[in-house]
Amino acid sequence: MDNALENAFRVNILQRLKDLAEEDARGQESQSVVSLDQQAVGRLSRQDALLSQSMAKATQARRQTQRVGLSAALKRLDENEFGYCVDCGDDILRERLEFDPSVTRCISCASG
């Protein structure tokens, strides 16, 4: 992989990490503690708020998983190991890396 392509992947990964951080900031309010005061909020509204809170926490966990994978991809770029399958050592298709730069396996190893 040439330097221009590596730099393009690095920029892409850093932008994705920035986007995740922005999504985290927007999602903080949805994860706040739900008031259990029935005088202030009706039972159904409280259940809806609890469900929304649960979904926001699950989304946060998904973003964290993505963040870990993208950070690992940056590390692989720094170590000149980016784009190679961790199982067989073959090249990972460029299109696959463009779709998800955190992938660590070629299609053959991932499906087999």
Image (cartoon, grey):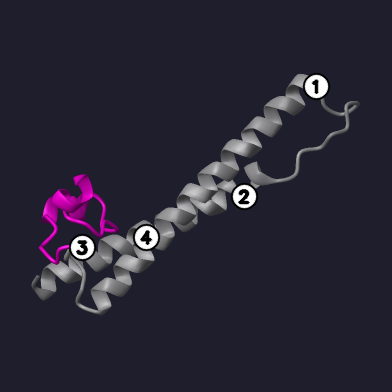
State left or right for residue 106 relative to residue 2: right
Question: How many labels were placed on the picture?
Answer: 4
Residue that label 2 marks? 28
**What residue appears at the point 52 percent right and 50 percent down from the top-left corner?**
61
Mark 3, residue position:
87
Q: Residues within 10 Å of mark 3 (few under 14, many from 20)?
A: few
Amino acid beneath label 1: Arg
How crowded is the residue under tag 2: few (<14 C-alpha within 10 Å), some, or many (20+)? few
Instruction: Say what secondary structure mark 2 lies in.
Output: loop
Which numbered marker is on residue 4? none
| Residues at marks 1 and 2, CA–CA distance in whole angstroms | 23 Å
Among the two numbered marks 1 and 2 on one chain, the one whose residue lies closer to the N terminus: 2
The residue indicated by pointer 4 is: 69
User: Who's the residue at 24% across and 73% down the image?
Assistant: 77
Task: Give the residue type that dot 2 points to.
Answer: Gln
Q: Which mark is residue 43?
A: 1
Q: The residue tagged with tag 4: helix, strand or loop?
A: helix
- Tell me the quarter of the picture where residue 89 sits: bottom left
Which element carries disc 3, helix, strand or loop? loop
